[in-house]
Amino acid sequence: MMIQLRFLPLNKLPNGVVRFHRSVSPNFQVQNPNFATTLITRVSPPSHYTTAFMGTKVSAMVLDGKSVAEDIRDKLTIEISRMKNKFSVVPGLAVILVGERKDSATYVENKKEACESVGINSYEVCLRQDCREEEILKHISRFNDDPSVHGILVQLPLPSHINDRNILNAVCIEKDVDGFHPLNIGRLAMSGREPLFVPCTPKGCIELLRRYNVNIKGKNAVVIGRSNIVGMPASLLLQREDAAVTVVHSRTKNPEEITRQADIIISAAGKPNMVTASWIKPGAVLIDVGINPVEDSTDPRGYRMVGDICYEEACKIALAITPVPGGVGPMTVAMLLLNTVTSAKRIHKCN
Ligand code: NDP
């Protein structure tokens, strides 16, 4: 069976990935007898084409979160400028960072830069590791009341003496751009109810599948991980897209037997290279949420980031795969910006 694939544009590519420019035939074809599914039904017009390249064998298509996210950000920049000119509204995002965790500080910095790049105002509060819960609540309350703030994000994880639940409950639901408020999650779980916001990482995963025209309806989807911020909402979103969803977690026996049945896998376990070839059905679409540091003496930092899915092995079997970095990460940030703009439009009724 032969399926013709065309690929979306890509800017920066991880190791082992080749960029095909316009000079390469746009009718470039992948032949693989194992591609029994028709997950990808429609294609978008590419400017150049990307596929993972293993030795002489062409393999899985790269789902390029970085360039899709750039496209979303470009459109948001135009939309924000329109809102400013027509309604004098500038979206604003407030970020609360508690403690000195380096990874959290980096994430907050990235979000701040992303806001600036599209024209969203960002407000930042940095609190000491030993700050009291009341102090965080006081800032949330202030941002809840501030009309120039349309989204409030408390960077997780919080120090162990702080009760996460009290903090997340305090963010007013209309500004809960992370989508972690129990009311938003509850609405996501119920049919016929709509959350005001959907958590950014799972939303980014689904958006990426949509952008590459991956057919979700009726497919077997497996989510690895059941955390409140990724795994659980990802499984709810896939159900809303009419997939048959199975969730695998740390207590699941023989998880690879379950994942081998999956047309689509979203992995959010935080375990480097856990998903190897034997876990993957030929022709599956793989979304790797995991961001895991592994030692690498060839990298000046002494480490590099890998996903939960063993990229090299998966590329030989899968139909499509997200790279790490450059897959889900940029989509998460783009969804945060999108949620903030949606919030500002809803609050100020500017459409
Ligand atoms: P958590 O640690 O909160 O959750 C991990 C989940 O994976 C748990 O449900 C756990 O099961 C499950 N799990 C752990 N080990 C296994 C295993 N061996 N087999 C099957 N399931 C397992 O992590 P998060 O959900 O917060 O994050 C997951 C990963 O995603 C991390 O690498 C994180 O850095 C990354 N991440 C990436 C983002 C992005 O934008 N790309 C955003 C957010 C997170 P149990 O419930 O039984 O403990």
Image: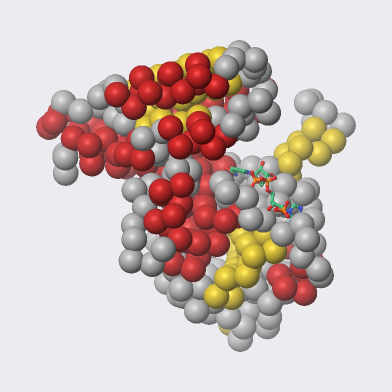
- The image quadrant of residue 139 is top left
| Residue 100 drawn above or below residue 346 | above
Residue appearing at x 71%, y 52% in the figure:
269
Frontmost residue, 65 versus 293: 293
Residue appearing at x 36%, y 52% in the figure:
195
> Which residue reaches farthest right?
297
Q: How is the image coloured?
A: secondary structure
Residue 252, image x, y percentages: 77, 65
Residue 107, image x, y percentages: 57, 29
Q: How many marks?
A: 0
Residue 63, image x, y percentages: 56, 56
Left or right of 259? Residue 152 is left
Residue 330, image x, y percentages: 52, 41
Q: Quadrant of the C terminus?
A: top left
Left or right of 303? Residue 320 is left
Please say whether residue 24 is visible from this viewpoint.
Answer: no
Please say whether residue 148 is visible from this viewpoint.
Answer: yes
Residue appearing at x 42%, y 71% in the figure:
42
Q: Quadrant of the N terminus?
A: bottom right
| Residue 108 drawn above or below residue 21 | above
- The image quadrant of residue 59 is bottom right
| Residue 216 drawn above or below residue 132 | below
Frontmost residue, 305 versus 5: 305
Residue appearing at x 55%, y 22% in the figure:
133
Frontmost residue, 255 versus 30: 255
> Which residue reaches farthest bottom?
1
